[in-house]
Image (cartoon, helix red, strand yellow):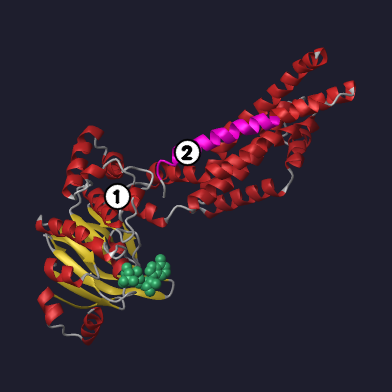
Amino acid sequence: MEKIITMMGPMLDGVNVTLQMFFITLVLSLPLGLLLSLARISKYKPLSFLVETYIWLMRGTPLMLQLLFVYYALPLVPYIGIKLPDFSAAILAFVLNYAAYFAEIFRGGIQSIERGQYEASKVLGMTYVQTMRRIVLPQVLKRVVPPISNETITLVKDTSLIYVLAMNDLLRTARTIVQREFDMTPFIIAGAFYLAMTLVLTWGFNKLEERYAAYDE
Amino acid sequence: MKMIRLKNIHKSFNNLEVLKGISLEVAQGEVVAIIGPSGSGKSTLLRCLNRLETLDKGTIEVEGEILAAEGPDGKCQYVSEQKAREICFKMGMVFQQFNLFPHMTVLDNIIEAPMLVKGIKKEVIIPEAEELLKKVGLFEKKNSYPSRLSGGQKQRVAIARALAMKPDIMLFDEPTSALDPELTGEVLKAMRQLALEHMTMIVVTHEMAFAREVAQRVIFMDDGDIVEEGTPEQIFNNPQHVRTQAFLKSML
Ligand SMILES: Nc1ncnc2c1ncn2[C@@H]1O[C@H](COP(=O)(O)OP(=O)(O)OP(=O)(O)O)[C@@H](O)[C@H]1O
Ligand SMILES: [Mg+2]
């Protein structure tokens, strides 16, 4: 018992790192993903092509590679090369990666809105921006809740990848203690934490879906 | 006064010429019914009017203001986006598929555009919207979402929504075609009421009885052209063109 209590200190620090990674990534990558999706469906071809390429790169290479690239290779790039501290590097890589996935989800949602909605808005005199903001995006939000929820739960677990930058997140802390003490408890605690977090998120997203159920389509 | 003036309208999709040089004038307070076989270009004509489709050639004038005109190169040129929007929201449109906003209540559907586009205050527009809902007989549904309404009710909300922008002209594209037969009556009634109030209306319809009773002028379109036009008596009782005759026979 005493052993578990002494473990809890470093484990909680690990939880803190994991939670920060999770929330900062989510808060930054959702709006960025939305912007990217709008650029992706833009009628201005060079822009949509650029974003398409970006999404292909981000989804076509492992997040781990992107993480290593931002941390180790970015500083070597001429002119823009900057050496980021490990936490910032991890956030940057995660946000860039997750924004690409969210962008594709938003794009699917936007394109699933019937043409009649745009036509009705246009005939009523709304501009494109007004139509997106008041008519299209509110309906998109309802439709993307399930896939966003999936992606968010994946993010909880993906945060553990930052161990490659030797950052002491929950999982790496657990492993360090296990190796030092020859005791598996930290793994169980870590697993329980990820499960609890997923449970909370699932509950939250269910609430959101219920709220949107006020109207059916 | 002429509310709408179309001159020599051309429109193609890819290589398919859908409108082959249509000219049409509609006077204030006039109710014009457009009839014709499927694919003849009736919807496209309406959609060109309020720039849901862009013209290839021709001129559109709404209430004396030019929306699109032939440029020096013979191609069609539109006025600025801002100007075009101001001209077009004088025309309300009702679609076959209603196109209500599913995430908004009936009342919100109606007040959204006046508030957003014209900047009308909520406390001013709500009584107006409620008045319109009473007119189409749906006041007690004002807080319902569209998914809870029948087709006929949806279409009446769509009419009220268009009217809330205080249009001078109403365009209807087969407003009853998606409805069960027993629900068309309530929508036609609302339209009849509008005609009695001297709203300028262009109605694409398969409802021959309605066209005969309410329209002052009936236009028969076929294959991208106006084949024949006249009063309901002329068109329905004494059609001149064989294609009109054949079409009317097929509608019986
Ligand atoms: N966006 C489009 N792209 C390509 N072709 C189109 C498009 N819209 C209409 N068409 C074609 O143009 C022709 C005229 O269509 P339109 O919808 O105007 O006919 P309509 O008279 O309204 O017919 P209906 O009675 O079936 O509604 C049809 O052949 C149709 O397939
Ligand atoms: Mg049609």
Total labels drawn: 2
Q: Which residue is mark 2?
A: A210
Q: Is residue B134 toward the left or the right of residue B52 in the image?
A: left
Furthest residue in direction top, as rendered: A2
Image height of A168 relative to B65, above or below? above
Q: At label 1, which amino acid type do we have?
A: Leu
Q: Is residue B210 toward the left or the right of residue A160 in the image?
A: left
Instruction: Say whether marks 1 and 2 touch (CB < 8 Å).
Output: no
Q: Which residue is mark 1?
A: A124
Measure the alpha-carbon separation of dots 1 and 2.
30 Å
Q: Secondary structure at mark 2?
A: helix
| Prevalent SS, magenta region | helix
Q: Is residue B215 visible?
A: yes
For ligand 1, give the image quadrant: bottom left
Q: Earlier in the sequence, mark 1 or mark 2?
A: 1
Marker disc for residue A91: none
* Closest to the observer, A56 or B208: B208
Please identify the quarter of the rendering in which residue A11 is found: top right
